């Protein structure tokens, strides 16, 4: 099954050789009905809607759309991966600090036990 290709409004403007405001107005006026908003607030526009609205010639720009969509998807995945990595690093730092505290407590308790058995 074919998955629809989406572009951000900036990417759509670049591919269609239109301004960002043109894409935004067309979306607001209902010409791009399959637009969606990602969790980060970025609006994505379906390429099929751009064609249906007459903003994009499907034969002339196919390579550009594919290249931009692939590049933008990779860039978004990279940003997501970097964010997840930062979270993981923070969790590791927290666990490392907790581990050091536990090691210090363990060493202290061992000294108490050693002193208790000597007396």
Image (spheres, rainbow, N blue to C red):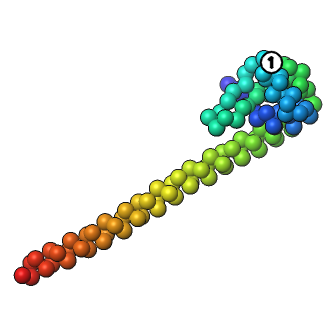
Horizontally, is 114 left or right of 36 in the view? left
Q: Which residue is mark 1?
A: 29
**Residue sitting farthest toward the left:** 119
Task: From this view, report whether residue 69 is shown above or below residue 57.
Answer: below
Camera-side residue: 2 or 68?
68
Quarter of the image for residue 117 reads bottom left
Q: Position of residue 98 (x, y in %)?
A: 37, 62
Label 1 CA crowd tier, 10 Å (few <14, some 14–19, many 20+): few
Q: Residue at x 87, y 37 (%)?
A: 14
Q: Secondary structure at mark 1?
A: loop
Q: Is residue 82 visible?
A: yes
Q: Is residue 48 above or below residue 101?
A: above
- Depth order, front residue of 5/103: 103
- The residue located at (84%, 19%) in the rendering is 52
**How many numbered callouts?**
1
Relative to 49, residue 115 above or below: below
* Residue ID at (73%, 25%): 35
Residue 49 placement: quadrant: top right
Residue name at image x 81 percent, y 37 percent = 10
Residue 63 seen in the current view: no
Q: Give the quarter of the figure containing the N terminus.
A: top right
Measured as percent of width and height from the top left, residue 79 is found at 66, 48
Percent x, y of residue 3: 70, 28
């Amino acid at each position: 099954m074919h998955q629809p290709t989406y572009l951000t409004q900036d990417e759509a403007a670049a591919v269609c050789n239109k301004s960002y405001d043109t894409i935004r107005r067309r979306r607001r006026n209902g010409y791009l009905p399959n637009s969606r908003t990602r969790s980060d607030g970025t609006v994505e526009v379906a390429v099929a809607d751009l064609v249906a609205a007459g903003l994009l010639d499907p034969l002339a720009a196919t390579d550009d759309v594919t290249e931009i969509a692939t590049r933008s998807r990779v860039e978004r995945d990279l940003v997501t991966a970097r964010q997840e990595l930062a979270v993981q690093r923070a969790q590791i730092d927290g666990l490392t600090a907790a581990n050091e505290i536990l090691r210090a407590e363990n060493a202290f308790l061992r000294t108490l036990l050693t002193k208790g058995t000597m007396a």
